[in-house]
Image: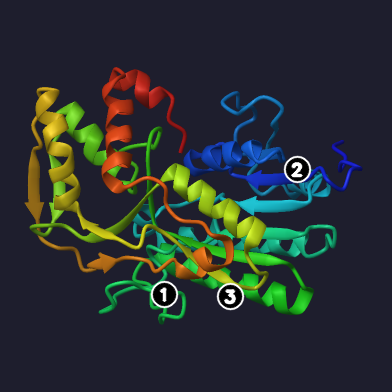
């Protein structure tokens, strides 16, 4: 049985999904701030976390007793866990509901019975909840009309989060992140264009581009995303929603243009196959992040060029089989 620390100055954060790509970066950010951290993950065990971080395996997935134990020993919660991706949600929209909505609502319900929790941060999706737009940069007040099952379930769960805030006083903050990228992201996983692009170049695989230039997306290095999530935890107001991105957009083609010189230096080519645009792809999605910056001072530290250079170097320095063996979904 875990116990909450007695010292009021010692804050413990429970990170559900803390063994994932973004989760590991969030855990590192929390540890750097002096937080004690408890990670709940779907594996029985996980060794890739910093020292002194406690890991609780929850392989059943919806076993609330494991999460209850972690929450009772914590002062705050960050929930990064989600069972699907935007790409996989189209394959089975009903499954997208069944594996995400009941589990997350049960989690909100459980957290609402714990008045000691000072904050609960839930990770929504800035890339999917808004849908099509004519706005160059999207603020949190923009209408939401998602095109993917993934975006629809994320938005529905935001509404549940607000219900628990209003009716049970759950101190919940929703974060709408843009497209994360960086060292250690899993390629070929129906999300993460940059990881897939780099892996395709190094693998000398053909890369599909839907439309001549692809879509416009807001890319944020995982270290900056982790810092933004923690900023929402420490400075965000309960009941509020915050965008989290770079506020700058790039087409898929522009990303490839940045990667091309490094590929050439490595003796690799960028092999692109242009396919017709897909009706469910939002043409452009770029987030206005002034709201989070105004309350926390957070802003991205890495430019897209520096972040891509850092990410390329990480993959290029490793045999691909070795690189992929270090990658966690």
Q: Quadrant of residue 59?
A: top right
Foreground tag (2 vs 3): 3
- Please report the residue visible at 53 percent of the width from the left and 68 percent of the height from the top: 294
Residue under circle 1?
A: 139
Q: Quadrant of residue 210?
A: bottom left
Q: Is residue 120 above or below residue 191?
A: below
Q: CA distance from mark 1 to mark 2?
A: 37 Å
Residue under circle 2?
A: 66
Residue 51: x and y, percent? 67, 24
Q: Is residue 204 above or below residue 22?
A: above
Q: Is residue 18 above or below residue 78?
A: above
Q: Quick one: label 2, few (<14), some, or many (20+) residues within 10 Å?
A: some
Foreground tag (1 vs 2): 1
- Please report the residue visible at 68 percent of the width from the left and 59 percent of the height from the top: 120
Q: CA distance from mark 2 to mark 3?
A: 25 Å
* 141 sits to left or right of 207: right
Q: Residue furthest right?
A: 6
Secondary structure of the residue carrying numbered label 1? loop
Which numbered marker is on residue 159?
3
Which of the two discs, 1 and 2, labels the residue nearer the N terminus? 2
Q: Quick one: label 1, few (<14), some, or many (20+) residues within 10 Å?
A: some
Residue 188 visible (yes or no): no
Residue 217: x and y, percent? 28, 59
* 142 sits to left or right of 254: right
Instruction: Pick the residue in front: 205 or 165.
Output: 165
């Amino acid at each position: 049985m875990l116990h909450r620390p007695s010292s009021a100055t010692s804050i413990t954060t429970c990170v559900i999904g803390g063994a994932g790509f973004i989760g590991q970066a969030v855990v590192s950010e929390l540890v750097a701030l002096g937080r004690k951290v408890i990670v709940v993950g779907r594996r029985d065990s996980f060794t890739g976390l910093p020292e002194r971080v406690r890991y609780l395996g929850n392989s059943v997935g919806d076993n609330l007793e494991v999460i209850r134990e972690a929450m009772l020993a914590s002062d705050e919660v960050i929930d990064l866990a989600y069972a699907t991706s935007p790409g996989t949600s189209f394959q089975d929209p009903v499954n997208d509901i069944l594996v995400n909505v009941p589990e997350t609502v049960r989690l909100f319900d459980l957290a609402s019975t714990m008045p000691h929790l000072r904050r609960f941060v839930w990770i929504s999706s800035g890339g999917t909840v808004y849908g099509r737009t004519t706005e160059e940069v999207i603020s949190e007040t923009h209408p939401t009309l998602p095109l993917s099952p993934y975006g629809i379930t994320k938005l529905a769960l935001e509404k549940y989060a607000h219900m628990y805030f209003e009716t049970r006083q759950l101190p919940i903050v929703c974060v709408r992140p843009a497209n994360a990228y960086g060292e250690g992201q899993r390629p070929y996983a129906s999300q993460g264009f940059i990881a897939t692009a780099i892996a395709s170049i190094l693998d000398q695989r053909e890369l599909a581009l839907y439309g001549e230039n692809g879509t416009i997306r807001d890319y944020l290095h995982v270290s900056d995303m982790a810092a933004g999530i923690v900023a929402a935890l420490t400075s965000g107001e309960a009941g509020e929603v915050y965008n989290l991105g770079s506020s700058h957009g790039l087409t898929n083609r522009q990303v490839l243009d940045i990667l091309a010189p490094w590929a050439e230096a490595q003796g690799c080519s960028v092999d692109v196959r242009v396919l017709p645009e897909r009706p469910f792809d939002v043409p452009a999605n770029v987030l206005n992040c002034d709201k989070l910056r105004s309350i926390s001072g957070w802003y991205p530290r890495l430019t897209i060029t520096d972040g891509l250079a850092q990410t390329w170097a990480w993959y290029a320095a490793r045999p691909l089989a070795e690189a992929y063996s270090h990658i966690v979904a």
